Image (cartoon, helix red, strand yellow):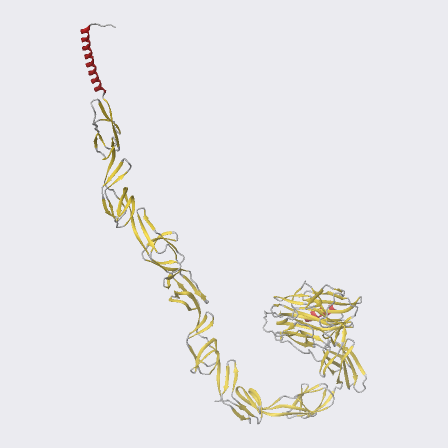
Amino acid sequence: MKRHQTVFLLSLAFLLISLGVPVHASASSVTSQDSGNAIGMADIGVLQTSNGNLSYTTFTNAIIGRILFNGGDFLSYNGTSYVNQASVQLDGVVKAGNQYFWVQNMPIIQSEGGGLYEIYLSDLVWNITQPGSNISTSIPIGGKGSLTTQNGVAFYEYKDNKPIITKAPFVLQLITSANETNNYMNLQFSYSFSNSSTIGIGEFDDFVLGIPQSPSFVIGGENPSGPNGFEMIISASNDFSTLYVNSWNSTMWSGYFYNGEFYTMPSAISTSFGITGKVSQLHGISETWNNAMDYAVQSSGKSTNGFLWNVSTSASYSQGKLTVYVTPGDSMWKLTVKNAQTGLEVFSSQINGSSESFNFNANQGYYIADFQMMAGPSLIYITQVDFSTNDYALVSVSTVVPHYYVNGIEEPSNSTVPVHLPSSICFPKTYQIGLGERLFFEYSLVNGVKEGNVVNITSPGIYTINATYVMQYEVGFPFNVTLTVNSVTENFKLGWVNVGSTLNISNQTDYISNGTRAIITSPLSFKVETPINVTLQGHYIIQYLVKFPFNVTIIVDKSTYFVNSSWITKGYTVNLPNQVIPVKDGVRYYVEPSEFQVNGPITFPVAYVIQYLVRFPFNITVSVNGTVMNFAQAWINSSSIVVASLQQIHIAKGVMYNVSSFSFVANRPMNYTPIYGVYYYVRLTTPVPVNINGENSTINSGYYLRGTHITFYSIFYVNSTERLLVKSNVSQLNVKEPSSISDSYIVQYLIHLPFNMTFSVNGKQETGQSSWVNSGSNVVVNPQFIYVNSTERYLVNGENFTVNAPRSINIPYTVEYIVNINNNKTWYPVGSIIKLQAPQGFFQVVTWQGTYQEPNGATIKVNGPIIEASITSTNYVNVGIVTAIIILVIALTVAILLKRSKGGSGNTQK
């Protein structure tokens, strides 16, 4: 990886080189409360070398961090809630005068699902001069953010609320620089972003703090609050939260700025040194350093701890080329080559990347490669590597095998050959002598130094090589066996053993193939003195793995087991009895009996029926596939058709359910409640007419629907002439439980008399024209007068009868009217003849005045009330006659007298 002069070119080149295929994430859940420090690359001024750790200190005005994110599934958990977020932070310690600041360039990556992510830029600045230090509000500040107080500490914070929306993969590069602007400390926060279709770059915040000091990032040493350094890390999105990772795929690089270029940080620890956010130890991020590519490879797993690399160097020469290797690559390395004999410098160069080849046309001889690592202007590490430019060496080989190889070319043994540098001397590991016999390479001695079967010759000289072989015989078994060969444990089916070795085989279980194993039941021991094939006859048994689709009870050799799979000895019979296997709530398997002999690995197809638990709220009679059953709950075979007809179910004394017909298919556990009405038994002494739910009816003892409202009549009219007198111990009944009603009734009939009159019913006197009389009553009507009014009455004859039906009674009677004759009142039957007779004198005339105008002595007929009064008047006829007679007598008398007078005195005059 090469350094670049500008941030934009660095970001763009990294994208073009590194874009890969995204990892598709799946849902994650918090499974552990473990937590460790954030993960990434942190430099605190400590180098790890093969000779121990070295400390250094340096300063820089800018730090950089870059992540290529290919995708992930993650969440930040604070102990009570979680968000699908992680933070990527470029953090560092800035020193300005005697003050220290913790500066965070801290984007938040939020997963939106479906491979879509939102990136929110943010930055924070803390005063860490002393624990609890604040960024004073009295000091002028500038920037897009503002001061925030947390736990009593004031700090600067800016958050961009407009996210970068992208899909993976994408590259996010962060740069934070510290400079002096107008005599004030100035921190600039920049970013660059790129994906397959978009490139963005810019400064998103410019923080100015009004202190007249020149700032710079400091790496190494300590400040009052902790170590100095900088880091590019992955963490939770919030302080005191833990990042849990289900999947993650990224690469990361970080460095510092010096003299116009960015360099890889000299040292890197995997864990953060300065933030409170955490990453799960078990469900975190594992990382390794790829020195050739100059980045850390990060993936989900157990979180990494410790240094990412040891600082190391090496050099090799071949055919005019000097190749050097450095770790870490792309850091600030300087190479100087000196002649080992004269000490004169013959070559120098800066090293780019992790390895670089140089043209090195120097004289043959020995040289020293001097590697210097710089951190800015500071030399922080120096090491040396010797190498030679000589091209030949003389090699003498002695061995029992007939040949060996020099750079792949066969050479005869027990010979001396010149070889180019570098060269590889290779001895065959085995040499076949005959069937079951061979020579086996043990070691080689190179100028008395023990080495392996490959000897690398890299420098000129004379080399004497002796290769030692041992005789071996081939030993075979029917399967892989674990054994000890001269106290060394080995495992093989066909193996080579040193002649004379003693083999010990103990009791063991050996897995021959998938589903087949052998159990050695008795140990044996023997000495290898010839090639041999050991049959192990009588020392082992073969077992096969028998699997079932679920746990079942089996009987093998009179022993009972409950298993999902089991190793069964070859030839044994496995018996599956009739059984029921619970699966989950409401589901079970009904296993039919079967048996089989084990002659190989098998997944036995158990004959079973899935049954579901069907529950009713009470016992119901149903037909299950045509079979009549009665149950409240029962196990029913899957897909069975359950049918119920209309039925009455007596639940308890006086309680009945009227269940409607229904049907269903049993394809799952069911709590089935049919449609039904609850009925209660109402017991009556006798049927009586009532009003049931607003309708007249005659109630009998029987079951009535819950909630039925029954009103008992005291009088019920059958019709206009018949009624019932009802007696009941209740007047209203809401049916909500079994009930017993004491009731009775009397039939009454309406009798109708011709008049309002007096009569007796069963000896009890009544008065009226009509009356309701109990059936069977005796009615007596005595003879009596019925006065219509004061002038008319009826003389009713007596009547005696029994009432067995409504009756209108016609009783014989005589109509009588009152006859008033001269104020003498007398009742006469209609049609009576009355003679009007009153005494009268000679000079009187009597007549009758009233209803009739009749003379005295007349007769009248009674057809209604009669009032008659006799009127006596003078009989003028008779009076006239008598008067006439008197006058005549007087006249005669006078006449006579006159006559006499005349006769006596003659005429007299006065």
Left or right: where 790 falls relative to 76? left
Eyeballing the image, is 488 above or below 716?
below
**Is residue 901 something one can see in this rendering?**
yes
The answer to whether residue 688 is above or below residue 560 is above
For image coordinates 57% across by 91% down, the residue present is 485
Counting every numbered tag in the picture gives 0
Quadrant of res 81: bottom right
State left or right for residue 128 relative to residue 687: right
* The C terminus - image quarter: top left
Residue situated in front as seen by the camera: 554 or 697? 697
Q: Is 49 or 815 nearer to us in this picture? A: 815
Residue 531 visible, this orientation: no
695 left or right of 225 in image = left
Q: Give the image location of residue 458, x and y in percent.
A: 72, 86
Residue 735 screen position, x and y as percent = 39, 58
Quarter occupied by residue 626: bottom left
Image-based side of 694 in relation to 386, left or right: left
Q: Position of residue 153 (x, y in %)?
A: 70, 68
Residue 519 lies, in percent from the top left, at 50, 86
Quadrant where the N terminus sits is: bottom right
Toward the viewer: 822 or 784? Answer: 822
Relative vertical location of residue 793 with respect to residue 431 in this rendering, above or below: above
Task: Between residue 723 and residue 78, name the one nearer to us.
Answer: 723
